Image (cartoon, coloured by chain):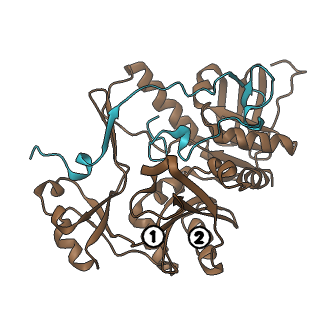
Chain colours: A cyan, B brown
Amino acid sequence: MDSAHPLLIRAHRYARHEADLHPAGCSYDDIAGAWRDDATGELAVEMPGRQGPHSKKMDVETGEDQKGE
Amino acid sequence: MTASESPLAPPVLVLASRNDFTCDYVAAALARRGVAFLRLNSEDLPSCEITLDPVQPCATIRLGGRAFELSRQTLRSVLYRRPVYLRDFGDDRWSAQERFCRLQWAAFIQNLAVFDDARWYNAPAATYRAEHKAIQLREAHKLGMNVPPTAVTNTPLSAVDKIPGSRYAVKGLDTVMVREAGDEMFGFTTFADSSELSGPEWRTAPSMVQWAVPDKTDLRVTVLGERVFAVEILVDGHGVNDDWRLHKKQTAFVPHELPTLVASQCVEIVAALGLRFGAVDLALTGGDYYFLEINPTGEWAWLVDAAGLPIDEVFADELAQ
């Protein structure tokens, strides 16, 4: 049987791209265990007005569990 | 390591990846409390020097010029944010060397379960079991939660005879995600009537077919220990009768007060599944709350900003206990 399963047919298909997920203008601080803004030195997560996280890990739909990532 | 360079023995271990921004929330909250922690990101492991004695257990880790020691006596809690197994998406992104290393490091992370005196948020073995949808529904039913009539079947047309109504929510037992020829395919919950359930292609793999809760408002309930944070998920101010993730850009998350019984049941199902944290999906219709599923690795950080919920602070308090 060569026909695809209906759930696969209904799945959203899109070109896969390797997105750069690093917060822009930030560097990872091993000691703080978090990203830090290059310009101000603040922890990115504590900066007012910064882009916050989305409803999925890094806004990438992997079923939330990132298996295989 | 010189004699003067005593290793740090943090009480909290965070197992994550660099781009797991949710962990930045926890890191900042722990820092505000003056709680020492070690964040181990999968990408950084090859650049660390690591030795684990699995029997004591005790681990020495050298990261970024600093030395750390994890021991049964000092490690109090672990925030586990890595996969419990690696899926085969069917692509060949990695060389044999890369694949080998990914598997070995993933196994190392999972073998840190030898620190079984620490409190795990969540323990990998419990997460693995808790992710099975049929097990979730069974546990919810045992606790007295409303569960939509459900069939796991490769013959959905005959199975829906036992499910009321004429519209059904259909989803994979496992996440519907595959890769092919440079593309990726991801399946949201789909909705169908019986005329769409009769083809022979359904037999090729089982699906989960469920009564589609009518006129529903989706709720996301984040449970952390005894604490419960519930939000309504509204699109243009209303609930939606399909998968709300299809409308992410128009979605608002509004705090919701659960009835005491329902909140207790959410706490209980997390515990019944051997977890300390869970993201429970409920559907509210006509005043009745229906259990849909629980995500042992569910996201929550977006709710800190979007709904004003201090989940990061509560997480830090939990980890620091």
Question: Residue B202 versus residue A38: which sits nearer the camera?
Answer: A38
* Residue placed most toward the observer, B93 or B19: B19
Mark linked to residue B266:
2
Q: Chain of mark 2?
A: B
Q: Label 2: few (<14), some or many (≥20) within 10 Å?
A: many
As drawn, is A49 to the left or to the right of B128? right
In the picture provided, is B44 more to the left or to the right than B160? right
- Above-or-below relation of B32 to A16: below
Contact flag, marks 1 and 2 (Cβ < 8 Å)? no
Question: At 57% across and 41% down in the image, what residue appears?
Answer: B111
State the image coordinates of residue B254 (x, y, percent, origin top left). Answer: 63, 61
What is the residue that sits farthest to the left in this orientation?
A1
Amino acid type shown at disc 1: Lys
Q: Position of residue B149 (x, y in %)?
A: 35, 76
* Residue B199 coordinates in the image, percent (x, y): 12, 58
Tag 2 or tag 1, which sits nearer the N-term? Answer: 1
Image quadrant in which the C terminus of chain B is located? bottom right
The quarter of the picture where the N terminus of chain B appears is: top right
For label 1, the SS is loop
Residue in view at x 51 percent, y 35 percent: B106
Q: Kindly identify the residue that appears in the image at 54 percent across and 41 percent down.
A: A57
Label 2 amino acid?
Cys
